[in-house]
């Protein structure tokens, strides 16, 4: 037994140690520092490889035709020129197709969010009878489809060809997004819905007033996923739309690329110059097509990580 005389300090305890020593964290090991360095190098290379094509496209869209023909344009524009931008932006069909893309994306994203949210909320209820069948039907479509010709016959027989519904309805529900949202709804506390039921809220009232306000992150993430998918989609419109004024801008870009490819296959000096001029037009169209998504993405990106992590499958 240790006795301490009055007025003298007792033995030092961990609580009596200096605060600076208590706050000192564990020093990273040499292996962890090596991992951090390798990770930084790899991620930097991924960023460079990802940005290089887009920067090259921007440089070509701002360059003169002579440096493009000579193959001198890489990352810096050569001979600043906005003629291609004026040519593309003066084409009325480009703006008509651009407007179609905006309309298709907004309508399709709204429909997809409503259907995916309702379906995922239903699948998140473990007490629902037939839930396994509904999950199986959704998962089955991830691996099997009716095929291109049956889908075309179906859309045509339903009278949706050459209409907006041929673009927005066939891919209204993405099963991956559905399963992510379902997992998010399953992670919400059951007590919240039980309390809402005690207060007299119906199922729809609980969804609208309790669940959806708590699901802003996952909904914003799904909006981003669907909007990017519909904005970049071209094959569905190319397949079901025959009228030029109904096509989205991605099909407009595809037609430019197809025209340049046809000129290139014909051969000859004049055709080669036409290919290079068409390549400049393509670069300008790609830049104008990509800018809206790049402008919208930063406003939704802050919800992206939290939405995906909250909706991830829990172990």
Image (spheres, grey):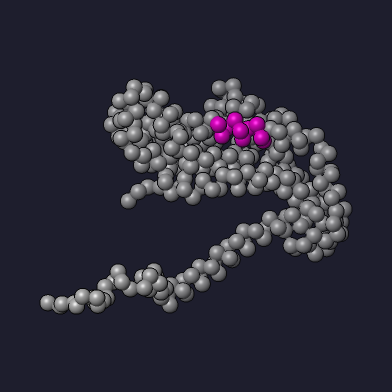
Relative depth, front residue between 274 and 77: 77
User: What predominant SS class does the magenta segment belong to?
Assistant: helix
In this view, the residue farthest toward the left is 1
Relative depth, front residue between 274 and 136: 136
Return the x and y of residue 289 as percentages of the image width and height: 70, 44
> Is 75 drawn above or below residue 142 in the view shown?
below
Residue 154 can be seen, yes or no: yes
Return the x and y of residue 79 as percentages of the image width and height: 86, 59
Residue at (28% x, 31% y) in the render:
127
Return the x and y of residue 169 as percentages of the image width and height: 55, 30
Left or right, residue 296 beside residue 244: left
Relative depth, front residue between 290 and 307: 307
Residue 282 can be seen, yes or no: no
> Is 193 drawn above or below residue 256 in the view shown?
above
Left or right, residue 287 beside residue 164: right
Q: Is 135 contained in the magenta span?
A: no
Return the x and y of residue 196 as percentages of the image width and height: 34, 28
- Magenta residues span 101-110
Residue at (12% x, 77% y) in the render:
1
> Is 157 drawn above or below residue 33 in the view shown?
above
Left or right, residue 280 beside residue 16: right
């Amino acid at each position: 037994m240790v006795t301490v005389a009055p007025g003298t300090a007792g033995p030092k305890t961990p609580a009596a140690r200096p605060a600076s020593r208590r706050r000192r964290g564990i020093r990273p090991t040499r292996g962890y520092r090596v991992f951090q360095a390798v990770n930084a190098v790899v991620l930097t290379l991924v960023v460079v490889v990802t940005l290089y094509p887009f920067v090259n496209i921007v440089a070509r869209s701002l360059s003169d035709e002579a440096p493009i023909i000579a193959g001198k344009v890489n990352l810096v524009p050569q001979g600043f020129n906005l003629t291609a931008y004026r040519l593309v932006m003066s084409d009325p069909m480009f703006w008509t197709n651009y407007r179609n893309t905006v309309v298709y994306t907004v309508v399709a994203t709204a429909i997809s969010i409503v259907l995916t949210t309702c379906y995922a909320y239903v699948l998140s209820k473990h007490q629902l009878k037939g839930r396994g069948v509904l999950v199986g039907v959704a998962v089955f479509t991830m691996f099997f489809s009716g095929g291109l010709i049956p889908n075309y016959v179906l859309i045509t027989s339903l009278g949706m060809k050459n209409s907006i519904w041929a673009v927005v309805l066939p891919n209204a529900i993405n099963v991956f997004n559905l399963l992510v949202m379902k997992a998010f709804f399953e992670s919400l506390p059951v007590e919240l819905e039980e309390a809402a039921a005690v207060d007299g809220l119906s199922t729809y009232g609980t969804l609208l007033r309790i669940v959806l306000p708590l699901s802003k992150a996952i909904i914003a993430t799904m909006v981003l996923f669907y909007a990017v998918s519909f904005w970049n989609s071209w094959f569905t419109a190319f397949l079901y739309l025959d009228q030029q004024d109904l096509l989205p801008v991605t099909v407009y870009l595809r037609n430019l690329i197809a025209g340049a490819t046809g000129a290139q296959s014909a051969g000859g000096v004049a055709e080669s110059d036409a290919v290079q001029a068409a390549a400049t037009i393509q670069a300008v169209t790609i830049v104008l097509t990509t800018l809206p998504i790049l402008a919208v993405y930063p406003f939704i990106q802050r919800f992206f990580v939290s939405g995906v992590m909250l909706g991830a499958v829990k172990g």
